[in-house]
Image (cartoon, rainbow, N blue to C red):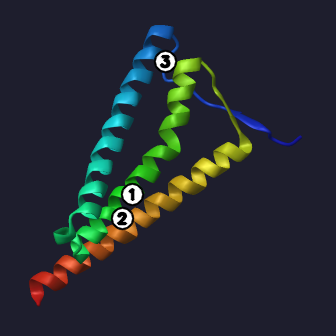
Amino acid sequence: SSVSEFLLLALADTRQLQLLHFWLLLGIYLAALLGNGLISTAVACDHRLHTPMYFFLLNLALLDLGCISTTLPKAMANALWDTRHISYAGCAAQVFFFVFFLSAECCVLTIMSYDRYIAICK
């Protein structure tokens, strides 16, 4: 037989803890959106920040937004609506995008460290 959906493990069994997890995840998600959005806006709007270091910081903020937006909305929906199902295609998409954003973040961090190395040594 083929697999069409997966069952996710619940963070908590009681409804009050599920709602608490929803509000905590929502707070974390909004804080990440606000922080990375402010970084992106500041770098994009201020022409003095158009240097390589801030360009990489902008890319890192955008990758972080993509990474956190891959998993947290589904986790919040599961906690709020007391569901535990995810389709096979949805799970594959989440894993693909999460791995893509994390590997891109590692590459950008590597490039940023090499940029700082060059700036210090030269």
Q: Position of residue 69 (x, y in %)?
A: 48, 45
Q: Which one is earlier in the sequence, the residue at label 1 or at label 3?
A: 3
Query: How many angstroms separate mark 2 from mark 1 (CA)?
Result: 5 Å
- Relative to residue 48, is residue 88 drawn left or right? right
Disc 2 residue type?
A: Asn
Disc 1 residue type?
A: Leu
Residue at the (80%, 39%) spot, across then down: 4
Residue 12 badge:
3
Q: Say which residue label 2 marks.
A: 59
Q: Position of residue 62 (x, y in %)?
A: 39, 57
State the residue lying farthest toward the right: 1
Q: Position of residue 27 (x, y in %)?
A: 34, 29
Residue at the (74%, 36%) spot, across then down: 5
Q: Say which residue label 1 marks.
A: 62
Kindly indicate the quadrant of the structure image that contains residue 3: top right
Against 99, is 80 above or below? above
Disc 3 residue type?
A: Ala
Helix or strand or loop: what does disc 2 sit on?
helix
Against 91, is 7 above or below? above
Q: Quadrant of the C terminus?
A: bottom left
Helix or strand or loop: what does disc 3 sit on?
loop
Query: How many angstroms separate mark 1 from mark 3 (CA)?
Result: 31 Å
- Relative to residue 31, is residue 62 drawn left or right? right
Against 74, is 120 above or below? below
Q: Position of residue 65 (x, y in %)?
A: 41, 50
| Pointers 2 and 1 in contact (C-beta within 8 Å) | yes
**In front: label 3 or label 2:** 2
Helix or strand or loop: what does disc 1 sit on?
helix
Residue at the (85%, 43%) spot, across then down: 2
**In front: label 1 or label 3:** 1
